[in-house]
Amino acid sequence: MSNKYVTFGEIMLRLKSPERQRLFQSPSLEATFGGGEANVAVSLSIFGADAQFVSAVPDNAVGEACVRELMKYGVDTSAINKVKGSRLGIYYLETGANQRPSLVVYDRAESAIAKSTVKDFDFASIMKGATWFHTTGITPAVSQEAADCALEAMKQAKAAGATVSIDLNYRKKLWNYGKKAPEVMRELAKYADVIIANEEDIQKCLGIEADSDVTSGELDTKVYEALANEVKKQFPNVQVVAITLRESKSADRNGWSAALSGKTGFYLSRHYEITDIIDRVGGGDSFAAGIIYGLSHYDDEQYAINFAVAASCLKHSIDGDFNLSRLSEVEALCKGDGSGRVQR
């Protein structure tokens, strides 16, 4: 059986202030790479899957370093275009603490992926033999060209018989090229089998409202079941809706769980109280990778959602965009081993 997972989107240079400092509080920034779909590909590869990331990067030393970083984790980079005279998008990250939230500043206009067009990618060939294709709502927010590429990739993935997932990932700061998110995202959602989101993503990207107040600290799970049912009603092609349920108590402390409206029923995951968050950026992508792996490797949808939440819970302990948690570690947490004791 084929075991090829393809993701498409933008990868960026991530420049983070050291520890919990403000940006430029000291004259240094930690340089790594990250981006929604790349993060998913890395996590899937670490789980043992055959993962391919499709994108565009500049044909220079920065682009080469970016590709090498992905290759280090076993990701297939053969469909990444190297574009002369282009730039890699950048995001600056200031990690929050206590009641001070984390801050992200984007510098990604005119990036290699933002200026790429459908003709730059042979999506029909890329999708041959693909089991699963994944993208996010971040990519179509970057530019009309990137949105066109994401749509074409989804169409070709469907034509190839792959399962198609999209993490809606609403980013208010990115929708600047004249289109509102629902105009673009509702068209993409027509080609998805699996939708991954939180309640705000569904509201802002699909225009479907949730009757909830996440600031109250209490989550009414019936609201999310109704929300998922409405998504499936409006998009009959969607078979699975996975909704993350984050309770932000402070920058360091979050409640973390999820709900899954699947093919066999509605399921709630185990709930985790995450108290000493190292880095929550990439948490949603680690959840997406967990859902993709869980749904394609386990017959039990309850276990699949528990697996995804456990994978994402562990990511909160890891610095950087990538979830470096191994499959055995996620499965151990699923079985209840969250003690953090030294493994000898």
Image (cartoon, rainbow, N blue to C red):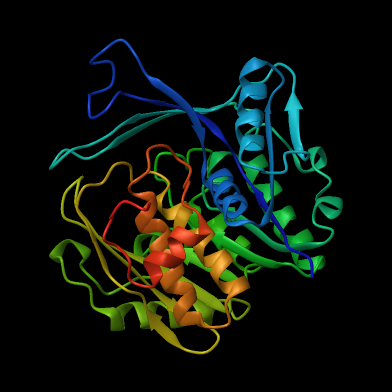
The answer to whether residue 194 of the structure is visible from this angle is yes
Q: Position of residue 187 (x, y in %)?
A: 62, 62
- Left or right position of 126 against 328: right
Residue extending furthest front?
344
Q: How many marks?
A: 0
- Toward the bottom, the furthest residue is 264
Query: Residue 119, percent across and down?
Result: 82, 41
- Eyeballing the image, is 46 above or below 338? above
Q: Nearer the viewer, residue 211 or 261?
A: 261
Q: Is residue 67 above or below residue 235?
A: above
Residue 116, given in percent of the width and then of the height, sits at 71, 35
Q: Quadrant of residue 78?
A: top right
Residue beneath the point at 33% across and 71% down: 336
Left or right for 81, reference 266:
right
Instruction: Tell which of 101 and 48 is nearer to you.
Output: 48
What residue appears at the point 31 percent right and 24 percent down from the top-left corner? 17
Q: Is residue 169 visible?
A: no
Taking the spot 39% from the left edge, 77% from the top edge, the residue there is 227
- 225 versus 341 height, above or below: below
> Looking at this rendering, what residue extends furthest in the top direction?
27
* Residue 91 or residue 141, whichever sits in front: 91
Give the left or right position of residue 180, taking residue 100 as reference. Answer: right
Residue 342 position in % (x across, y down): 31, 51
**Residue at x 28% of width, y 55% of height:** 340
Which quadrant holds the N terminus? bottom right
> In the image, 130: left or right of 191?
right
